[in-house]
Image (cartoon, rainbow, N blue to C red):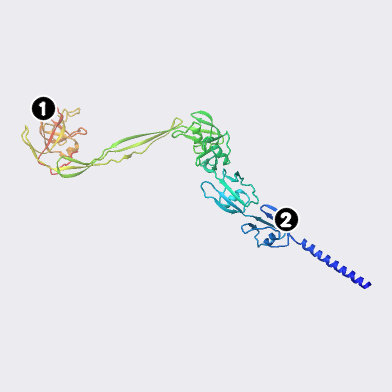
């Protein structure tokens, strides 16, 4: 009996020992599990697991997932105790971008409205509005675990905004009924100390240009007077114009018109006056002559009429504050080039006869001239001159012509009605613009001439014919 009792006690101790060992192993196994931080759509919970792969950990924790969900680390990755597993479930998004763009349907793992738009390749500009279920959705609102989203984007309109920092203008986005609303939606605040153009109450039109500039107190010195005013502008010239003190003509300012407004608001206007004058004279056209054997001698034919030219100088005078600081004259230059006439002259010589009181004459050329007369003591000088350019005496039968005609016709015989025959043998001054001849007399038989008459050039025809009379 005693032995049976002892064996029974021994079995009991053995069983208790085994149980205690198994409990210890169980406690040891339980205490050896990993602590994992599981974040599901932004909500965090702590779990303890003996699994190593992310997929096994999620399954062991009873967390369902699909291939469209975003899991980090990846499902096949192994994690250590203390690591984080994030699961962002995909939401079905229906987005109406507005502005006539086709609606978009896509999946997004983002929780914030602004980031959901980025998944569609869109971004929110100042003034844009995002709506969900008919209410405005802030871009930073946490949507949490939402499986479906029906969003509407109302995009702001583009306009050009000019400020001190962006005098050339920058692109801005805004919306609203008025300019004020558009600026406010674009994050631009305005106050009474600012100049807003156009007026803030003006109807907002997409694409318009809006200026928002601080009003500055200016002290302007002009014509020796100080003018204090308030104005605004991206540069000195613009601010002066808006203050009713525009730079006129060549006026200059210090600082210059295209510089920013000075910090102290002091501007000097220097009135500048520029005047220009021109002194010009005509360049008379020439004539390019071509012979025509079918035209009679001294007949001409104009083919193309030219035009006179012009030469001259320019003088520029500048005054600053009423004092002349510049007076310069340019070198003489041709302002307009002359264009020559193109004409033909006749070379057909017709020898003719004419009955005169002095008998018949034979001539090859007849020219209308203005005739005057002279004698030794009526030569237009204070003394009596008896000699001529040819060496002959001043007497009837001698005729004087201009120097150019003398060089061409000196020594030729001529006939003048009511005077008779003569020889071109002297030089006189002539009458500008006219063919002219001066008929000689002795002092005691002088006759005064001052009228038009005909001049006949008598044969023989000279070998060195002058075709065109000048």
**Left or right: 393, with 263 as reference point:** left
Q: Secondary structure at mark 2?
A: strand
Query: Which is nearer the N-term, disc 1 or disc 2?
Result: 2
Q: Horizontal and vertical percent for residue 280?
A: 32, 35
User: How many labels sit on residues?
Assistant: 2
> Label 1 vs label 2: CA separation?
151 Å
Task: Using the rendered image of the protein, determine whether residue 373 is visible from the camera's viewpoint.
Answer: no
Q: Position of residue 314 (x, y in %)?
A: 36, 36
What mark, if any, has residue 445 been given in the picture?
A: 1
Judged by depth in the image, the label closer to the viewer, 1 or 2, is: 2
The quarter holding residue 312 reads: top left
The quarter holding residue 313 reads top left
Q: Is residue 172 left or right of residue 57?
A: left
Would residue 408 be found to the left or right of residue 326 on screen?
left
Find residue 332 and report its image quarter.
top left
Q: Which mark is residue 46?
A: 2
Where residue 340 appears, x then y in whole percent?
25, 41
The answer to whether the residues at label 1 and label 2 have Cβ atoms under 8 Å apart is no
**In-front residue for pair 42/325:** 42
View extreme (top): residue: 444
> Whole-percent x and y of residue 12?
87, 68
Q: Secondary structure at mark 1?
A: helix
Query: Is 259 drawn above or below residue 75 in the view shown?
Result: above
Q: Residues within 10 Å of mark 2 (few under 14, many from 20)?
A: few
Viewport quadrant of the N terminus: bottom right
Camera-side residue: 249 or 85? 85
Numbered tag placed on residue 403 in the rendering: none
- Report whether residue 94 is seen: yes
Against 318, residue 151 (above or below) is: below
């Amino acid at each position: 009996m005693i032995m049976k009792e002892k064996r029974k006690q021994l079995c009991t101790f053995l069983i208790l020992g085994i149980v205690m060992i198994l409990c210890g192993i169980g406690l040891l196994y339980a205490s050896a599990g990993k602590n994992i931080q599981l974040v599901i759509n932004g909500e965090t919970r702590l779990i303890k697991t003996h699994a190593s792969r992310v997929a096994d950990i999620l399954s062991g924790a009873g967390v369902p997932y699909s291939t469209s969900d975003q899991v980090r680390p990846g499902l096949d990755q192994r994690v250590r105790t203390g690591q984080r597993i994030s699961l962002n479930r995909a939401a079905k998004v229906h987005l109406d971008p507005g502005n006539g763009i086709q609606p978009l349907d896509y999946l997004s793992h983002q929780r914030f409205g602004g980031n959901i738009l980025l998944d569609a390749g869109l971004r929110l500009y100042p003034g844009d509005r995002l709506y969900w279920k008919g209410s405005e959705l802030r871009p930073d609102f946490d949507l949490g675990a939402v499986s479906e989203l029906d969003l509407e984007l109302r995009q702001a309109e583009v306009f050009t905004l000019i400020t001190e920092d962006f005098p050339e203008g920058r692109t801005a986005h805004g919306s609203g009924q008025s300019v004020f609303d558009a600026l406010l939606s674009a994050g631009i605040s305005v106050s009474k100390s600012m100049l807003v153009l156009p007026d803030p109450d003006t109807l907002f039109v997409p694409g318009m240009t809006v200026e928002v500039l601080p009003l500055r107190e200016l002290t302007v010195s002009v014509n020796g007077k100080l003018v204090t005013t308030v104005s605004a502008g991206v540069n000195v010239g613009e601010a002066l114009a808006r203050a009713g003190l525009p730079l006129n003509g060549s006026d200059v300012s210090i600082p210059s018109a295209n510089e920013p407004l000075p910090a102290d608001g002091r501007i000097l206007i220097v009135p500048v006056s520029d005047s220009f004058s021109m002194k010009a004279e005509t360049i008379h056209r020439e004539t390019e002559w071509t012979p025509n054997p079918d035209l009679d001698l001294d007949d001409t034919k104009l083919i193309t009429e030219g035009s006179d030219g012009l030469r001259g100088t320019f003088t520029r005078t500048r005054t600053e504050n009423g004092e002349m600081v510049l007076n310069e004259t340019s070198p003489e230059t041709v302002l307009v080039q002359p264009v020559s006439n193109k004409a033909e002259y006749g070379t057909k010589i017709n020898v003719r006869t004419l009955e005169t009181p002095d008998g018949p004459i034979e001539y090859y050329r007849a020219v209308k001239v203005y005739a005057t007369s002279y004698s030794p003591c009526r030569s237009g000088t204070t003394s009596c001159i008896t000699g001529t350019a040819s060496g002959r005496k001043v007497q009837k039968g001698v005729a004087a012509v201009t120097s150019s005609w003398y060089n061409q016709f000196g020594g030729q015989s001529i006939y003048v009605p009511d005077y008779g025959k003569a020889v071109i043998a002297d030089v006189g001054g002539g009458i500008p613009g006219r063919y002219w001849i001066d008929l000689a007399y002795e002092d005691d038989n002088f006759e005064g001439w001052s009228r038009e008459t005909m001049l006949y050039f008598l044969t023989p025809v000279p070998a060195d014919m002058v075709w065109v009379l000048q």
